Image (spheres, rainbow, N blue to C red):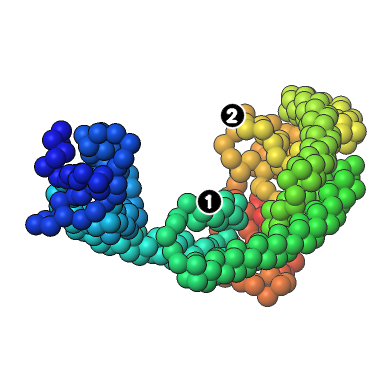
Amino acid sequence: MSDWTSFGRIDDEGTVYVKAGASERVVGSWHAGTPEEGLAHFARRFADIVTEVDLIEARLGSGAADASHTMTSLRRIRTTLDEAHAVGDLDGLSSRLDKLVVVAEEKAAEGRAARDLARVEALARKTGLVEEAEKIAAESTQWKSAGDRLREILDEWKTIKGVDKRTDGELWKRYSAARDGFTRRRGTHFASLDAQRKQATGRKDELVAEAEAMKESTDWAATANRLKELMVEWKAAPRAAKDVEQRLWERFRAAQDAFFAHRSEVFSARDAEQKVSLDRRHALLVEAEALNVDSDPQAAQARLRDIQAQWHDSGRVGRTWPPGWTVGCGWSTTRSGRRWTRPGAGPRPTPTRCCRRCATRWPRPRPAWPGPRPPATRSGSGRPSRPWTPSAGSWNWPRRPAETGRLRQAGWRPAG
């Protein structure tokens, strides 16, 4: 390129020629200096064109330039090269430009294919996001997580490019409709939930009021059963708002605790009182069993009456006796309705007498039932009664007075 005379010349009149194939064409004129300076001037113009081509080629090779724009620039340079006012290897530069145009066309085709693929992928991604949003709007009941996911879908939507405007608008309408539908369904749910919580608050207010009204009650059994029923109703009722639920529960629980604490105090005091009465009665029983009827029957009988009076004045005791305690002969102390027990039915270490009947009947032997066993009888209610069993020491209440007298003479006592 330093020998510009091989690509052009200047004649004596100052006309500048450049070689184009086997011919020459005029590119300008030079009258400002020597022919060498004129060729150098037009050579610099050619160098500028070469520099532009080098830059385009570098950007095309690195992928920084768009292949379509690069191809347009190369074609523009190739078209103006035939009329360029420059001196240089125009034929070599034309060949180079033709090759670069082919490369640019290939890269442009690859770019179009990549853009088409990216457009398809972007369309598939946005379609998938729209379908997911529609499914959430139609089915999801996880309101918080579903709302967060719809916002994430919107953020991801904004990052997806390459979908044509018309298709993108249609997909956006579907997404917007799904989001609005989900918002309406969520609002309806929470409105219904608020109404349900208000109803639950009213119902639990009633339960709390009833429990608080019964906390001072002394009808222990009925109140305890009703409080248990209130607890079942409380669990069956829907939940109110969290803070309201906690406040109502504390009031309800406090009313229950107050009642049961009061009952526990009363029962403890009653148990203590009954224990004192039980100890007094036990002492009276011990004293009654220690009476000596044989030496002084009248004094023993008078003392027994005093013991019976003290027995009735000793206060209330429980219905059950502690293990190992006995009740004397059973005739006067364990009579309960129509059920009596035969004196001395169980083995006793020494014969003791606690009443007149014991004094007259205890020493007598207990004979077995004479003759065959009487047949079974029926009670007044019509149900079949148990047969008489002499070995058991008791019999079922007979219906005929004559049989009662015979049994009593034999030492038997009615058992039921």
Q: Position of residue 114 (x, y in %)?
A: 29, 58
Position of 378 relative to 404 (above/below) = below
In the rendered structure, which amino acid carries the disc numbered 2? Answer: Pro
Q: Residue at x 29, y 42 (%)?
A: 30
Say the numbered circle drawn on residue 387.
none
Looking at the image, which residue is at 37% across and 62% down?
119
Q: In front of the other: label 1 or label 2?
A: 1
N-term mark: 1 or 2 = 1
Quarter occupied by the N terminus:
top left
Q: Which mark is on residue 155?
A: 1
Viewer-closest of 239 and 185: 185
Q: Give the residue furthest to the left.
A: 22
Q: Is residue 13 visible?
A: yes
Q: Residue 349 shows which numbered tag? A: 2
Q: Residue at the front extreme?
A: 12
The residue closer to the viewer here, 291 or 63, is 63
Asked whether, in this view, residue 32 is left or right of residue 269, the answer is: left
For the residue carrying disc 2, how many other residues have a C-alpha within 10 Å: few (<14), some (14-19), or many (20+)?
Answer: few
Mark 1: amino acid: Asp
Horizontal side of residue 19 vs 368, given as left or right: left
User: Measuring 62% from the left and 33% from the top, which residue is drawn there?
Assistant: 323
Residue 83 rendering spot, x and y as whole percentages: 28, 56
Q: Nearer the viewer, residue 379 or 33?
A: 33
Q: Is residue 154 above or below residue 278?
A: below
Residue 41 at x, y percent in the picture: 28, 37
